[in-house]
Amino acid sequence: RAAVASGANARTKEPGKFLSSQQTVELVHELTNTQNLGVDPVSVIHGGNERGTYVCKELVYAYAMWISPSFHLKVIRTFDMVTSAPEKLSGQAADKMQAGVILLDFMRRELNLSNSSVLGACQKLQEAVGLPNLAPRYAIDAPADAHDGSSRPTLSLSALLKQYGIRLTANQAYHQMVKLGIVEQRERYSRT
């Protein structure tokens, strides 16, 4: 009563009316037929510490729209914006992607970029135009005169030690390689 007296929507106290409305019954039926989660859209627990009515996320949104006309309008406008935005942005994204590919190809040829550099640039380009990252996480750069390409499969130091039966930790092996001059630690500063 205090919530209603203070100007809150009276429907906030009527979830039973929401659940029994024809529109909600039809929505629950549709969710039951399409959800395939193995969980009912509405679950009622009687008694115990966890008693109450539990619903799926879609019903939470439907209830919020039933209570609040302003929230309902926001949902409609957001849906409209999301469904119409790809048409507006797809041309821009395609132009950005094409320009990025041309620039990257030019830089790869003229600046002799390594495969790992090209990979990093491709990942940034995918991110910039909103494409999912389908590229591998890293590439190994082989010597320039390698006949089999510049990316070679590799294993972690731990996996190599285990594969060859060497009883050292990766940290111990790394320090041994530093002492022998096989590896050295370097830093490269980044702008990001």
Image (cartoon, rainbow, N blue to C red):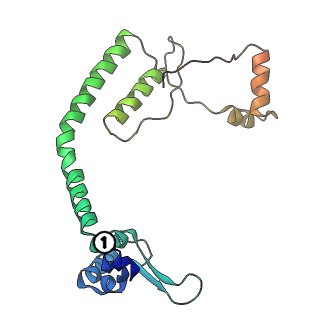
Residue 103 x/y as whole percent: 30, 19
* Frontmost residue, 96 versus 189: 189
Name the image quarter holding the N terminus: bottom left
Residue 161 x/y as whole percent: 74, 33
Residue 149 x/y as whole percent: 47, 20
The picture quadrant where one finds residue 171 is top right
Q: Is disc 1 surrounded by few (<14), some (14 to 19) or many (20+) residues within 10 Å?
A: some
Residue that badge 1 annotates: 62
How many discs mark residues in the rendered view? 1
Left or right, residue 164 beside residue 111: right
Residue shown at 35%/30% (left/top)? 125
Left or right, residue 75 beside residue 43: left
* Frontmost residue, 168 versus 6: 6
Left or right, residue 13 beside residue 155: left
* Frontmost residue, 86 versus 182: 86
* Frontmost residue, 49 versus 110: 49
Residue shown at 40%/39% (left/top)? 133
Circle 1: element type? helix
Residue shown at 59%/83% (left/top)? 49
Q: Residue furthest right?
A: 167
Q: Amino acid at mark 1?
A: Ala
The picture quadrant where one finds residue 5 is bottom left
Residue shown at 51%/90% (left/top)? 46
Q: Would you place residue 150 above or below residue 3 in this image?
A: above
Q: Would you place residue 57 above or below residue 16 in this image?
A: above
Left or right, residue 181 beside residue 103: right
Residue 10 x/y as whole percent: 31, 80
